[in-house]
Structures are given as structure tokens and as C-alpha cells.
Amino acid sequence: MDSVVRYPAVSANSMRILLTGPPGCGKTTVVMRIAEKLSHRNVAGFYTQEIREDDRRLGFRWKRFDGPEGVLAHVEIKGRFRVGKYGVDVTGFESSVVPVLSDERDDAGLFVIDEIGKMECLSGRFVAAVRRLFESERPVLATVARKGGGLISEVKAYPGVRLLDLRRGGCDEVAAEILRLLSQPA
């Protein structure tokens, strides 16, 4: 069975690639493989990872490709920004992660965003930065939640976007497809 579901795109040479799929299917794994293979293009952006203790998921951390890292969400974070049982550190995310998504960065050959999801979209500054990137000519690779309104559905409908649906076990095939797309002339 093919592990990639392809949706029609306006432009075959789109440099706006979105990767979606169920939780735990390997979206972050694919993003990390792509960033490693394309490190010569000066990848800018961030990826997320679960924070686990024993077999319990306690939250999520972010890590920028240029080194800094921090906590995005955790069961122990209190405050008004919440997704399920997790409190979300919107202020920390905005001050530490959002600036790396500036479409005015001349040094970035590829912007990688892992992920455009409910937690990240609690930040108005993040939403605005992603919109600016999608309106620019800058190449973007992002993971996106399967379901959701607002920015989540907006980026999927953006002209020229390639939306790839990852199935469990299809990381190698999807990574190869993304590398192929990113190597096409604009």
C-alpha cells in the first residue's frame, strides 16, 4: 500500500510542502531527516518533541535548528493558554521561536516548521509569521495537524501547497518525495 496520499496542488514546483498524518506516524522524524540532508541550505525553524517520564507524556519541547530549546507545553504549566491537559508557554514560544521564522532572513535557504498545530496557533505572532512566510517566495516545509480551523486549514488551502499525508511506516518514502520536490527548480 502506498504510504503517501497526494493532494492536488496549484504549482508542481511549489516550495511550500506540508506534511500531515496521525500522531506518532513519524512527521518529526521526516522533518529531521530532511533538515539533516539539507543542512547546507541553512535550515531555519524548529521542531518539537514529546517530554516523557516513564510511559507518561508530560508535555512538548521545541528546539530551534540553530540550537536554543525550551518547553512549549507541560502538564505543570498554569495559565490561560491550554490545550487539553497541557498549559502552553505562549510568551516563551513567541520570544524564542517566532523570531527565527522571519521571512526577511537572508541566510535561510529553507524554513522548517514542526508543527502548525493547536498549541503553536495560540500565538498570534506565530500565526502572523507563518502567514508572512506563506505569502513570500521563501521555501517552507511544515508539519500540520490533520484537523483544525484557522491557520491549520488556511495553510492547506494556500495556492501552490503540496500536502503529503504520512502513514505509519512510510518515513523513508515520504522523505525521498520531499527531497525530490525541494530539488526541483522553482
Image (cartoon, helix red, strand yellow):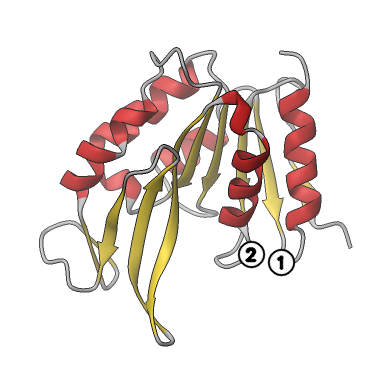
* Mark seen at residue 19: none
Dot 1 or dot 2, earlier in sequence = 2
Q: Which residue is mark 1?
A: 168
**Residue displayed at 48% across by 14% down:** 136
Alpha carbons under labels 1 and 2: distance apart: 5 Å
Q: Is residue 165 above or below residue 162?
A: below
Q: Is residue 93 above or below residue 132?
A: below
Q: Amino acid at mark 2?
A: Cys
Residue occupying the far right of the picture:
1
**Residue displayed at 76% across by 14% down:** 185
Q: Secondary structure at mark 1?
A: loop
**Residue displayed at 73% across by 38% down:** 178
Q: Quadrant of residue 104?
A: top left
Q: Amino acid at mark 1?
A: Arg
Q: Which is more toward the observer, 165 or 174?
A: 174
Q: Which is more toward the observer, 86 or 29?
A: 29
Residue occupying the far left of the picture:
79
Q: Position of residue 44 (x, y in %)?
A: 46, 31
Q: Do residues under tags 1 and 2 come within 8 Å of each other at their CB atoms?
A: yes
Q: Position of residue 140 (x, y in %)?
A: 55, 29
* Quadrant holding the C terminus: top right
Q: Quadrant of residue 23?
A: bottom right
Side (left or right) of 116 relative to 37: left
Q: Secondary structure at mark 2?
A: loop
* Quadrant holding the N terminus: bottom right
Q: Position of residue 24 (x, y in %)?
A: 58, 68
Q: Which is more toward the observer, 111 or 14?
A: 111
Q: Which residue is mark 2?
A: 25
Side (left or right) of 20 relative to 57: right
Other residues around mark 1 within 10 Å, as few (<14) / some (14–19) / many (≥20)? some
Circle count: 2
Q: Is residue 61 above or below residue 109?
A: below
